[in-house]
Image: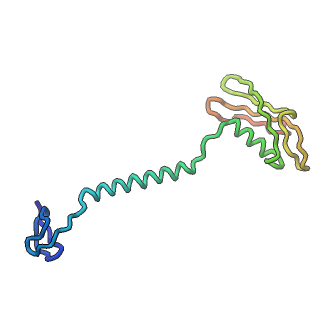
Amino acid sequence: MALVACSECGKEISDKANVCPHCGIKRKKELGNLKGCLGITAIFAVGFFVVLFVFSFAEPKRNAIDVCKMMLRMESANSDNVKIDDVNGVRYGDKVTYEWTPLTLKIQNQHGALVGVSATCVIDTKNNEVVKFVPPGIR
């Protein structure tokens, strides 16, 4: 038991007392453990929102074949005007080679015409990474 000052009359009273024996005022109870609970809850809430914020801006890992197709679109004069057919890859160990021919890949040239071109993309399947990209026009 500890002695604390009464908030009304200032005389010392027990910290367990509900009413001051000197002036009769009801003693206001401190939040005590509730303060600690609120603090811990606040810390968890802030931590949750920080994690949520970080992951909302984290870019999901793309499939390597989608990265190849994105690179092919970047080779076009107009990335919206590209026709990329799905082609079967040829596996060599941990690597898969995708080859587009003028029949399966058409991009827009600088004159606005859609032309057939060839391109190659090699993907490492262990790491899901593009290890080689041969863009159209470079042979």
Quarter of the figure with residue 27: bottom left
Residue found at the far left of this picture: 21
Position of the N terminus by quadrant: bottom left
**Which residue is rendered at x = 81% and y = 33% of the image?**
100
Residue 107 placement (x, y as % from top left): 84, 42
Q: Is residue 119 above or below residue 37?
A: above
**Which residue is rendered at x = 34% and y = 54% of the image?**
40
Q: Is residue 22 above or below residue 31?
A: below
Give the colouring mode of the picture. rainbow
Residue 24 placement (x, y as % from top left): 11, 73
Position of the C terminus by quadrant: top right
9 or 115, which is in the foreground? 9
**Which residue is rendered at x = 33% and y = 57% of the image?**
39
Quarter of the figure with residue 22: bottom left
**Which residue is rendered at x = 60% and y = 46% of the image?**
59
Give the mark count: 0
Residue found at the far bottom of this picture: 9
Residue 111 placement (x, y as % from top left): 91, 50
* Image side of residue 89 versus residue 102, left or right: left
Quarter of the figure with residue 13: bottom left
* Image side of residue 55 versus residue 116, left or right: left
Residue 26 placement (x, y as % from top left): 16, 70
* Image side of residue 4 versus residue 53, left or right: left
